[in-house]
Structure formats: structure tokens, C-alpha cells
Image: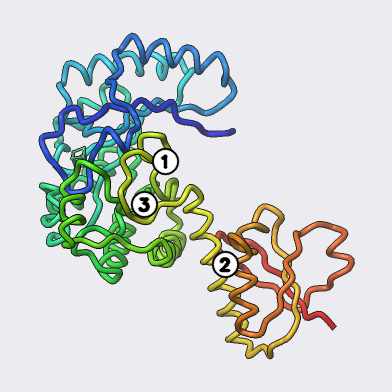
């Protein structure tokens, strides 16, 4: 069954912090905090159009558990009715690690919340402090353990390219977060948004965002880390929105960021295979599942060009029966996401 979120954004409500990168209204693309009645109407409408989907009601955007408790209760009471009558399968919220306690979790449980996403961002205290997060790595760890112990599904979010972060530290963050056994991960490259402390540091020459290619290479490695731990990365990169276009000053953003990362992973996987097998320069074909063809070829044929620069003239073909008859594979192996890669040389 297809899974979907009925997402409601709670912009900057309840957050007493000013993280270096956050202009939350830009991130959510919404300024308005929905009333319980609006949530109710929106859920009813959505259910009319998607009755066969597995749906969750999600309250994202702010630090939900730091919002006025009466507002939380009012929203959750509406959402819980739909869970109780079976029309919605769960309630998901996002919040900060230091806005989690046993009492808060008990209240969420009572209201039928099923999944909690924590904005961890980094597991380096120095990086957290420099980016004015207002919590420590130990608080991420404690909150994650409490959430799991009380039977919620755990989601973790991390950032790449934060002020004072390094690729090695980011990799370490990914390893530490993977060891907390989240059910899902989201990864966000740091973007310089107008109206944030990071904008001031950027304009003063004190902060330099990652180049797109650097962010792609690093995030491709992170996808490998989480895949090795069987943890799905359900989001990579900020959602596109008119507000984001308006407020983005600098930083590694691309509308198909995930595809760029998958494409880079594919290239590394093929190069690794070529080098391990000591293949000579020459002409080859590579067959991949049709759904992976554009990622295999790369944006603007980037992977084809990168292989050609090393002397490998590669023609990519989609996996279908006709091609199987024409091309008999000499080598097969598993690539990113476990896809089957088949290859042969052109005689
Ligand atoms: S805690 Fe979340 S909402 Fe608050 S400033 Fe930081 S990123 Fe923004």
C-alpha cells in the first residue's frame, strides 16, 4: 500500500532558539499556523481523494512539543479521531531533542502519536554550539533512546555543511546517528537563507557554504552509511518552494539533489568495479533497471563523460527482455540500493 503524509506546518511556534541556519518560515514555505478546524477540514478533504493510501497526519516545521500545550492538545485531539476510526494510520511530529521528557512522551502516547522526528543536526558539541542549536549531542542520544524505549517510531534529521563542520565530522555524525537505530533519516545540506545568523557570517566572509559537487559527494557517502545499517533516508535536500527560491542566498541546492547523489554513488560503484577487475580501456555496455537509467547515465550524461575520460566508452541500456537477448552479461553485481548491474564488453 502506498504511504503518504498529510503534513501540517507549524511555523516557528514555541521555538525560543535562533539556530544559525534557520529562517523557519522559509523552510516550511508557510507562515500560517493551522487551527484545529483547518486541520480537520484538510484531513477530511484529503481522505476523499486518497482513501486507499496508508496515511499519517504529520505536524512538522516547528518544535512541536515546545508549542503551547493547549494548541498541541487541540491539534492532536483532531488527528487522533482519524486514527481511532481507522481512516489514518498514525500521527507523526517533529521536535528538538531537548523538548523531550518522559512526561511529554506519555502525553504524546495518550494522544495517539506514533512517530517522532528529532532534529539532531550534528553529533559534535562544537558544531552544535557554533550553530546555536542550544542542545548537546548527549541530549540527542538520550531523547532518541527514550523515544525508542516508549515504542514510538524514531526519525532523525541531520545537516551537512554546518558552520565549523568538516566532512569527517559529518561522517562521524552519520555513524553515531545510525547507531541510535532510527527507523528513518532525513539529511539536509546547509543553505544560507536571508534573515539568518548564517547570512551575516556569509556576508562577512566568515562562513563558506559547500559547493554543490562537495555536498553531493558527501551525501552520497552518507547514503552508503545508512544503507549499510538498513535505515531508509526518506528525504535528502530541502523541498522546493517559491519561498525557498526567494530566501536562498547561497549553498548547495538542486531540485534533483537526491538523484545527483544516487548518480554519484552509481559512478563510484562502477569505477570501483572497473578498477578491482583491472579492466582495460575500451567499449562496454552496462544494463541497469529502467528506473535507474537516468541516474546511471548522470545529469547531462555526467557519468558517461567521467567514464569516457578514463578511457571507458560505456553505453547504458535499460533492463528489458529485448536487451537481455541482444546482450549477454559477462559480469553482474549489486549496486546502490541493491540494484542489479550487468555488464559486457562490446566486441
Ligand atoms: S530549533 Fe528548529 S525551529 Fe527553532 S530556530 Fe532551530 S531549527 Fe529553527
Ligand 1's quadrant: top left
Q: For this view, does 296 lie left or right of residue 191?
A: right
* Front one among 347 and 96: 347
The C terminus lies in which quarter of the figure? bottom right
Residues at marks 2 and 1, CA–CA distance in whole angstroms:
23 Å
Residue at x-position 57% and y-position 21%: 50
For disc 3, the marked residue is: 187
Q: Secondary structure at mark 2?
A: helix
- Ligand 1 contact, mark 1 (Cβ < 8 Å): no
**Residue under the image location 67 percent in, 81 percent down:** 312
Q: Residue 221's spot in the image, x, y percent? A: 42, 66
Q: What number is the disc on residue 239?
A: 1
Which residue bears the numbered disc 2?
Answer: 266
Cβ atoms at labels 2 and 1 below 8 Å apart: no
Query: Where on the picture, by quarter, is residue 81?
Result: top left
User: Residue 161, which numbered label?
Assistant: none
Q: Quarter of the image for the N terminus: give it.
A: top right
Task: Name the side, left or right, on which 136 lies relative to 346.
Answer: left
Question: Relative to 127, is 338 on the left or the right?
Answer: right
Of the residues under marks 2 and 3, which one precedes in the sequence? 3
Give the side of residue 341 with respect to residue 206, left or right.
right
Q: Nearer the viewer, mark 3 or mark 1?
A: 1
The residue depicted at 45 percent of the width and 30 percent of the height is 5
Q: Nearer the viewer, residue 323 or 92?
A: 323
Q: Position of residue 133 (x, y in %)?
A: 14, 48
- Between the residue at mark 3 and the residue at mark 1, the CA separation in whole angstroms equals 12 Å
Q: Quadrant of residue 288?
A: bottom right
Quarter where residue 343 is shown: bottom right
Q: Nearer the viewer, mark 2 or mark 1?
A: 1
Q: With respect to residue 100, does 344 lie above or below?
A: below
Q: CB of mark 3 within 8 Å of CB of mark 1?
A: no
Amino acid at each position: 500500500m502506498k504511504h503518504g503524509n498529510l503534513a501540517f506546518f507549524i511555523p516557528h511556534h514555541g521555538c525560543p532558539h535562533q539556530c544559525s541556519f534557520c529562517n523557519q518560515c522559509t523552510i516550511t514555505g508557510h507562515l500560517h499556523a493551522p487551527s484545529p478546524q483547518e486541520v480537520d477540514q484538510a484531513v477530511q478533504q484529503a481522505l476523499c481523494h486518497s482513501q486507499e493510501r496508508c496515511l499519517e497526519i504529520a505536524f512538522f516545521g516547528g518544535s512541536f512539543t515546545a508549542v503551547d500545550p493547549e494548541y498541541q492538545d487541540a491539534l492532536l485531539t483532531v488527528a487522533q479521531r482519524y486514527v481511532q476510526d481507522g481512516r489514518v494510520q498514525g500521527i507523526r511530529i517533529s521536535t528538538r531533542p531537548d523538548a523531550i521528557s518522559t512526561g511529554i512522551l506519555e502525553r504524546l502516547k495518550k494522544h495517539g502519536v506514533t512517530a517522532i522526528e528529532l532534529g539532531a543536526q550534528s553529533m559534535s558539541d562544537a558544531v552544535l554550539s557554533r550553530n546555536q542549536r542550544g542542545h548537546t549531542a548527549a541530549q540527542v542520544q538520550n531523547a532518541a533512546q527514550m523515544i525508542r524505549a516508549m515504542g514510538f517510531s524514531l526519525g532523525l534529521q541531520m545537516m551537512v555543511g554546518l558552520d565549523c563542520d568538516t566532512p569527517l565530522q559529518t561522517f562521524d555524525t552519520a555513524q553515531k546517528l545510525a547507531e541510535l537505530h532510527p527507523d528513518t533519516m532525513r539529511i539536509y545540506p546547509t543553505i544560507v537563507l536571508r534573515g539568518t545568523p548564517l547570512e551575516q557570517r556569509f556576508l562577512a566572509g566568515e562562513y563558506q557554504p559547500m559547493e554543490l559537487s562537495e555536498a553531493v559527494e558527501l551525501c552520497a557517502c552518507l547514503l552508503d552509511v545508512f544503507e549499510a545499517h538498513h535505515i531508509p533516508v526518506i528525504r535528502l535536500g530541502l523541498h522546493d518552494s517559491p519561498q525557498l527560491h526567494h530566501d536562498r542566498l547561497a549553498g548547495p541546492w538542486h531540485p534533483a539533489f537526491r538523484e545527483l547523489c544516487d548518480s554519484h554513488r552509481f559512478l563510484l560503484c562502477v569505477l570501483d568495479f572497473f578498477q578491482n577487475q583491472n579492466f582495460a580501456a575500451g567499449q562496454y555496455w552496462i544494463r541497469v533497471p529502467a528506473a535507474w537509467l537516468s541516474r546511471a547515465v548522470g545529469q547531462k550524461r555526467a557519468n558517461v563523460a567521467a567514464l569516457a575520460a578514463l578511457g571507458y566508452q560505456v553505453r547504458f541500456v535499460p533492463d528489458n527482455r529485448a536487451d537481455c537477448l541482444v546482450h549477454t552479461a559477462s559480469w553482474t553485481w549489486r549496486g546502490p540500493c541493491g540494484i542489479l548491474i550487468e555488464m559486457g564488453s562490446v566486441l
